Image: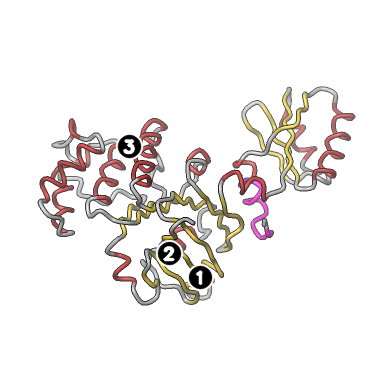
Amino acid sequence: MKEIAIDVTGLTKSFGTRTVVHDLSLQVPKGEIYGFLGPNGSGKTTTLRMLCGLLTPDSGRGTCLGYDILTESDEIKRNVGYMTQRFSLYTDLSIRENLEFVARVYGVPDPRQAAREAIGRLGLSTRADQLAGELSGGWKQRLALGACILPQPKLLLLDEPTAGVDPKARREFWDEIHNLAAEGITVLVSTHYMDEAERCHEIAYIAFGELLAKGTAREVVDQSKLSTWIVSGADLHRLAAKLETCDGIDMVAPFGTELHVSGRNKRALDAAITAAKKADGAHRWTRGEPSLEDVFILLMDKPKENFA
């Protein structure tokens, strides 16, 4: 059995009359990368903050790193590294100066040595004396991660850490996240990128404060009970408009030069496709495998449905 880092039940949080998170329960194993996905305003950030003791739920209970999230939040915070989407270090200090400053704030022994080690680990050696404000988005995120891991946290909280970062920098960032998880650090991360979601050990999809799906990427796709057809050919926009009105078709989504046509009831979907093919004759129709993105597009279109 895996050691559990986070174990919570029935978490609910409201701000005024608006319930942001409702009756959320989940477990996160130690040393795993757990991804949170969902539309803007869905409650992802609120959930992350409740899970790691940064925000007190209105109701519910649970533990994080063995500490009670209601009564021992100070102990939890001491073991959390929090990286926000917006760069929050000093732009008029160099990489080295920023890291040394953070090390001193957290009381890290030998701040200069700790900063040197973080700089080397994250490949920042050639830029150590460059001002943080002059860095590109990818280098800024790498610096921010270095600052997060200086106090040697047991849990990392990453709120859309690679927004606006180029694909190469994103991949390098995620390689380092996997290295940290392999060392036993638990990582909670929110993201809108499907390729990043697939790099998480487990994921959860949240919309309107409700947890709609959770598990590995493969499990979430399987839970959706989604079937998909792929259509290619000319004038797909006109065809998509027709298919969206057909019974048995829950989603029509363009993917480059193809359409993904999906439904939860396989028999009803196949009947709709058979009828469409007879009336069409100008397109190529092939049965496909639903992707994680297919599932999330459908979830965003139908956020109030129970997806389990």
17, 292: nearer the viewer? 292
185 lies above or below 18: above
Residue ID at (43%, 58%): 3
270, 214: nearer the viewer? 214
Residue ID at (13%, 37%): 129
Which residue was labeled with disc 3?
Answer: 138
Residue 195 magenta: no
Residue type pointed to by label 2: Leu
CB-based contact (under 8 Å), mark 2 and mark 1: yes
Pointer 3: residues within 10 angstroms few (<14), some, or many (20+)?
A: many
Q: Nearer the viewer, mark 2 or mark 3?
A: 2
62, 23: nearer the viewer? 62
Q: Where residue 167 appears, x then y in whole percent?
A: 42, 32
Q: Where residue 74 appears, x then y in whole percent?
A: 29, 71
Which mark, by number, is residue 51? 2
Which residue was labeled with disc 1?
Answer: 11
Residue type pointed to by label 3: Gly
Instruction: Specify the segment rendered in magenta.
Output: 296-306
